[in-house]
Image: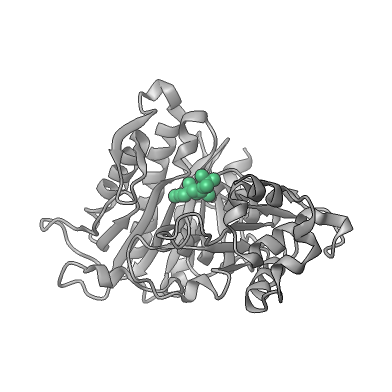
Amino acid sequence: MKNDNRMTLTQFLIEERRRFPQAAGDFNSLILNVALVCKRIAGHVAAGELGGMMGSASATNVQGEEQKKLDVVSNDLFVQGNNWGGYLAGMVSEEMDLPYHIPDHYDRGPYLLLFDPLDGSSNIDINISVGSIFSVLRAAATDRPPTEQDFLQPGKNQVAAGYALYGPCTMFVLSVGSGVHGFTLCPQLGEFMLTHPNMKIPPETQEFAINASNGRFWEDPVRRYVDECIAGKSGIRGKDFNMRWIASMVADAHRILMRGGVFLYPRDTKDPAKAGRLRLLYEANPIGYLIEQAGGRASCGGHPVLEVKPTDIHQRIGLVFGSKKEVERIEDYHAHPREEASSNPLFHASSLFRVAESQA
Ligand code: F6P
Ligand code: MN
């Protein structure tokens, strides 16, 4: 049996811990319980219509977005699967307005867990890959419940981050600060097995991911970058690009970890009240951490996303991540704007995005 020699997630964590003899078992319990929650969510996702969990929960979250039944179920599984273990001081979730405090009858511990319990949930009902994203920070104190302020740490403070992807197979992708490692759920054993050690993102790519229907709202550096990709061999890039958009960031991130690429959900002018689409603490930061641990780069356009000092637990941010050289190029376009965008012949071409703009 091929799996007989593979390392399980448990063994991987124990071996990692040997390198840090001072570390208590709390951290491993945290990651293993998050992995268990993800297995439970995988079961609900895989049951599809048969599980009776499809469709809307007839509620909205703090972001004003419709909650699906599985968003709510997944959030409850994360909370109930981690509140009792004694390793957490509190949790923040996309689906909860306020930080969750550990009930008094359980011990508080040294870590904070931040998560998007089901990313890409508009894809649930149509059987397209979705996932769970999580970030681990250190708590400032364990003798009191954490305040919102305690969660507002820059992404570079993360001690671990990861995601589960509920695709044709279920995967758990993790970094504890020593590279990125991918585990595949073995259906026979019910264990995550190490199948993708040391995932690395190639520095260059010919694949980009962006929701092009927002083209008319983009800032010039993004417009310039995408136009140049679309110009392909005939433009300054001198090579053709492919575009992919799954609309589950976690699935787009997984593709990029597997074979490179660049993902953009930039700040735009669509809704001036929103600084971007994705949430900093439980989407951009954990994915940014994984991407950088895999040798890629994650940026808000102007500066590294992991450097951003958060101001709100549900704060949104523009995000660009993936193959290092591509992200650096986009950062360069932000740092050195074109003299006058309208004088660039690319914008006079009947590009997809110009057509969209003229029809707006
Ligand atoms: O969580 C936000 C999210 O669902 C991401 O997973 C995804 O990349 C994005 O929104 C999709 O946005 P849009 O609906 O604009 O394509
Ligand atoms: Mn999400």
Position in image of residue 101 (x %, y %) = 19, 59
Q: Residue at x 53, y 65 (%)?
A: 288
Whether residue 30 sits left or right of residue 48 in the image: it is left
Q: Of 343 and 114, which appears nearest the observer?
A: 343
Position in image of residue 183 (x %, y %) = 54, 50
Rendered position, 189 above or below 286: above
Position in image of residue 345 (x %, y %) = 81, 63
Q: Quadrant of residue 111?
A: bottom left
Q: Of 21 and 262, which appears nearest the observer?
A: 262
Rendered position, 278 above or below 355: below
Q: Residue at x 25, y 61 (%)?
A: 90
Position in image of residue 354 (x %, y %) = 70, 52
Whether residue 318 sits left or right of residue 263 in the image: it is left
User: Can residue 189 be seen from the camera position used here?
Assistant: no
User: Can residue 302 be seen from the camera position used here?
Assistant: yes
Q: Quadrant of the N terminus?
A: top right
Rendered position, 360 above or below 266: above
